[in-house]
Image (cartoon, rainbow, N blue to C red):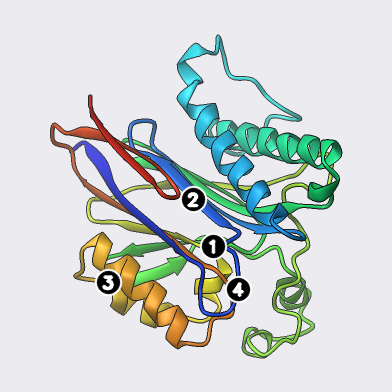
Amino acid sequence: MKLTTQAVGKTDIGVVRKNNEDNFGYDTRTGIFVVCDGMGGQAAGEVASKIAVDTVLGYFQEENKRSGPEVLGKEIAEVSELANALANAVQLANKAIRARSAQETTSAGMGCTLVAARVEGNLFSIAHVGDSRIYLIRSGAIQQLTTDHSLVMEQVRRGMITLEEAEHFEMQNVIVRALGSEDSVEPDLADLSLEENDTLLLCTDGLSRYVKDAAMLELINGKSLEEACDALIEAAKTGGSDDNITCLLIRAVEQTWGGRIFRRRGEDVQSST
């Protein structure tokens, strides 16, 4: 059975912040999906996250114009060519953010987190930097596919605190890896299989920190992607989120003839294939 994807993404400023530094984008034709959470003074975080989304989308939309797979830095033998392509796109996004930071004083020090998925048939690859997350919902269960690059999770990995203690850690928002902070960045990568009716959730920490896994599962199961996005954002708000909230849902369905959907935040375009 050949699979294709349906996708819906939404972002919300939340109930505390005065501007939205989150960005997301996707292109179902090229199978690329990305969510970023910006950080930096003034509007710089929003600039960084938009640069990252645009760069990653553009990398795969220009894929057929490249003569061969380019490797920025080192090729990672343990993962697929698909995952290595994601790593290339992330490196380019990092370079673009660094370049803008160097050019504009108002953008100095800006950066962002990133989660991205590339779907190709019955397989998908993921990349992440920072504390935005990717979840897989399959057969009535939810699984977190990423591990936060955060101070609190470093403490957990070293056995200094438990996962239960981590939920009450004072510096929840301190991350140890991000786009824009160094000249190069190493995303975590993975390759996985895709099954019919699988749903992937890409989200920023404005959602994941305030909605438990079990609640996410309940809000997604049996609902349309549109309904599920709305429900997740509302749950984060009522759960006390003080951040911007973004979720991008991707569902694997049996392939039928249809159109291409391409979206960036605030923009939705459909064209026939």
Tell me which residue sits at (30%, 79%) in the image: 218
Q: Is residue 256 left or right of residue 214?
A: left
Question: Disc 1 on helix, strand or loop?
Answer: strand
Q: Earlier in the sequence, mark 4 or mark 3?
A: 4
The residue that disc 4 covers is 17
Question: Label 1 neighbourhood size at 10 Å, few (<14), some (14-19), many (20+)?
Answer: many
The residue that disc 1 covers is 133
Circles 2, 1 touching at the beta carbon (< 8 Å): no
Most foreground residue, 158 or 56: 56
Q: Nearer the viewer, mark 2 or mark 1?
A: 2
Residue located farthest toward the left when viewing the structure as drawn:
256
The part of the image, by quadrant, that contains residue 132 is: bottom right
The residue that disc 3 covers is 140
How far apart marks 4 and 1 lie (CA) works out to 21 Å
How far apart marks 2 and 1 lie (CA) works out to 13 Å
The residue that disc 2 covers is 24
Q: Earlier in the sequence, mark 4 or mark 1?
A: 4
Give the position of the N terminus as an image quadrant: top left
**As drawn, 73 above or below 240:** above
Which residue type does callout 3 highlight?
Gly
How far apart marks 4 and 3 lie (CA) works out to 34 Å
**As drawn, 272 above or below 20:** above
Q: Nearer the viewer, mark 2 or mark 4?
A: 4
How far apart marks 2 and 3 lie (CA) works out to 26 Å
Total labels: the figure holds: 4
Q: Earlier in the sequence, mark 2 or mark 3?
A: 2
Tell me which residue sits at (13%, 31%) in the image: 257
Question: Disc 3 on helix, strand or loop?
Answer: loop
Which residue type does callout 1 highlight?
Arg
Question: Label 4 neighbourhood size at 10 Å, few (<14), some (14-19), many (20+)?
Answer: few
Question: Disc 4 on helix, strand or loop?
Answer: loop
